[in-house]
Amino acid sequence: TLDGKTAAPTGESRWISGLDARRKVHELRTLVDAVAIGFRTARADDPELTVRHVEGPQPLRIVVDPFAELDAESKLVRTAPDIPLLLMVLDHADPVRVTRLRDLGVQIETVKPADQGRRMHLLDGWRALRRRGVRRIMVEGGGGLIAQLLGWDCIDQSLAFVAPKMIGGQFSPTPVGGEGRPFMAEAWRFDEMYWYACGDDLGVFLLGHAVG
């Protein structure tokens, strides 16, 4: 939204952007090797992460799920035998849950922890994806995952669709979560910025590794 929210305080987000912007997202999915989201987004939205509205190849679907908590009844897992799904989990995630998800057709990539065993070393995770031949990854949320990837210097482009709406709310989620940067001088900055009209929405495209 114009006031920087990605959902209402209730978590409801369908739909902030218009059909043209949503169609553009599906076009972009056909141009990348993988589409990635965090576990909380997967749990809240129960998405399929499939290509719709346009014709094109289906990318690998990735969920960053440190403790292998993705619900076996989620759309992502239920479609895993037909549409590839990869979970990135910590190397000490519950082996029972990991085995169950594997048995349901989910691919697993284990990643070492970054601190006290709670957070994933996402730079190592991204390197592991590269070894799998996954080069272009579109991260669709949520804010916590995007903040961590910015911190690991794993983002080199950003596209945001801004809708002519305001939702407000102190606890409404925003595109970048986490602890944030303590000072404006340390804000993540991109090299170039472009914008264009996309139906009723404004597309803002940022290029160059985010430095901060």
Image (spheres, rainbow, N blue to C red):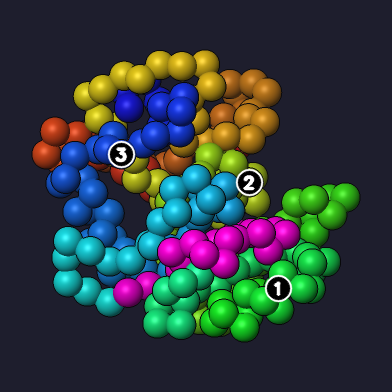
Q: Residues within 10 Å of mark 3 (few under 14, many from 20)?
A: few
Q: Measuring from the top left, give residue 80's x and y in whole percent.
A: 47, 76
* Image location (x, y in percent) of residue 72: 57, 67
Q: Amino acid at mark 3?
A: Arg
Amino acid type indicated by mark 1: Val
- Residue 63 lies within the magenta run: yes
Where does the C terminus fall, quadrant-wise? top right
Q: Position of residue 161 (x, y in %)?
A: 29, 38
Q: Are marks 1 and 2 in contact (CB under 8 Å)?
A: no
Task: Provide the residue designation for mark 1.
Answer: 98
Place residue 27 in its image quadrant.
bottom left
Q: Measure the alpha-carbon separation of dots 1 and 3.
A: 31 Å
Would you place residue 126 above or below residue 13 in this image? below
State the residue at coordinates (68%, 23%): 182
Looking at the image, can residue 45 be seen?
yes
Q: Which residue is mark 2?
A: 148
Residue shown at 28%/77% (left/top)? 57
The answer to whether 24 appears left or right of 140 in the picture is left
Residue linked to disc 3:
14
Residue 199 vertical placement versus 99 (above, below) = above
Who's the residue at 52% across and 36% down the image? Answer: 176
Q: Main secondary structure of the magenta part?
A: loop
Q: Nearer the viewer, mark 3 or mark 2?
A: 3
For disc 1, the neighbor class at 10 Å (few under 14, some 14 to 19, many from 20) is: many
Q: Residues within 10 Å of mark 2 (few under 14, many from 20)?
A: many
The Cα–Cα distance between marks 1 and 2, rounded to whole angstroms, is 23 Å
Q: Position of residue 108 (x, y in %)?
A: 64, 76
Q: Residue furthest front?
A: 73
Report the magenta residues as a range: 58-76
- Tell me the number on the disc at residue 157: none
